[in-house]
Amino acid sequence: MRAYAAKHARSATWRVRASETPAGKRAALIVLAIGMTLAGAGAAGLVLARHPVAARWDAVIPLPAPTGRIDPARPSQPGAVPQPVSLIIPSLGVQTSLIHLGLTASGDLQVPTSTRVAGWYTGSARPGAIGPAVIAGHIDSRSGPGVFFHLDQLRRGDRVYIRRADGTLVVFRVTTVQMYAKDGFPTLAVYGPVPDPELRLVTCGGTFDPDAHSYLSNTVVYAVETS
């Protein structure tokens, strides 16, 4: 069951040790802190909430696949891959710009300042380069659905498109959609090294705990590059 979030939600975090990420260069603990109240956004972060009168949010309006030059599905080194600028998920009707997410001074992963856009974690691979590219987004807020509101509806074989700074497209094919308890978040599977270009889409999910003002799970979409 999905419940409406309280006005001030506690932080819902995904803890990531830098030694387990592809770079493996940072000794500090990286905290993917998506669940805090967003300043100026009127949102309760990545909390999985359904407003009682928000049945209309459940409708999905598919988009056509984007057009443009598609990058061949071949492993590329980071220096040869342009940065991502937008994300398109035709089956979910999602089309959003991508902001850059880095780390705060305290070692937390920055979160999008709006529920309407997703963010690419710059400490992960660029889409199309070897390794997992990690993109996080909000699921909703008190004012309406977020960019990843329907993320758990993705199915095996669905396509996800990333447009990059040079105008090229890289295409990913969904392989699985998983939900994990927050205390069992699979850090290595999401952030760890892989031999090919892959994609991870991450948001909150599962049951909302009204006492903790937090969600008990995370939804993770796994995808591999395809042509």
Image (tube, grey):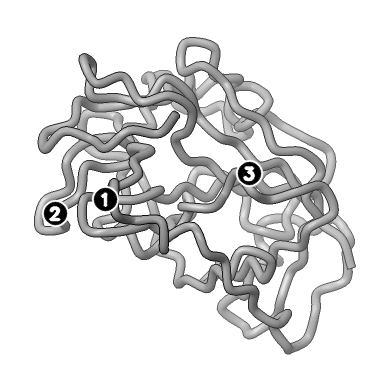
For disc 2, the marked residue is 42
Q: Position of residue 116 (x, y in %)?
A: 35, 64
In-image side of 16 versus 130 (left or right): left
Disc nearest the viewer among 2 and 3:
2
Q: Residue at x 31, y 54 (%)?
A: 112
- Which residue has dot 3 on it? 200
Give the quarter of the image for residue 73. Answer: bottom right
- The CA span between labels 2 and 3 is 27 Å
At horizontal 34% and vertical 50% (from top left) the residue drawn is 140
Which image quarter: residue 71? bottom right
- The residue shown at (47%, 11%) is 183
Provide the secondary structure element on which disc 3 rests. strand
Which residue matches tag 1? 141
Q: Nearer the viewer, residue 129 or 77?
A: 129
**220 lies left or right of 48:** right
Q: Is residue 210 above or below residue 121?
A: above
**The N terminus, quarter of image:** top left
| Residue 207 in the image, given as x and y percentages of width and height | 43, 24
Is 90 rendered above or below residue 102? below
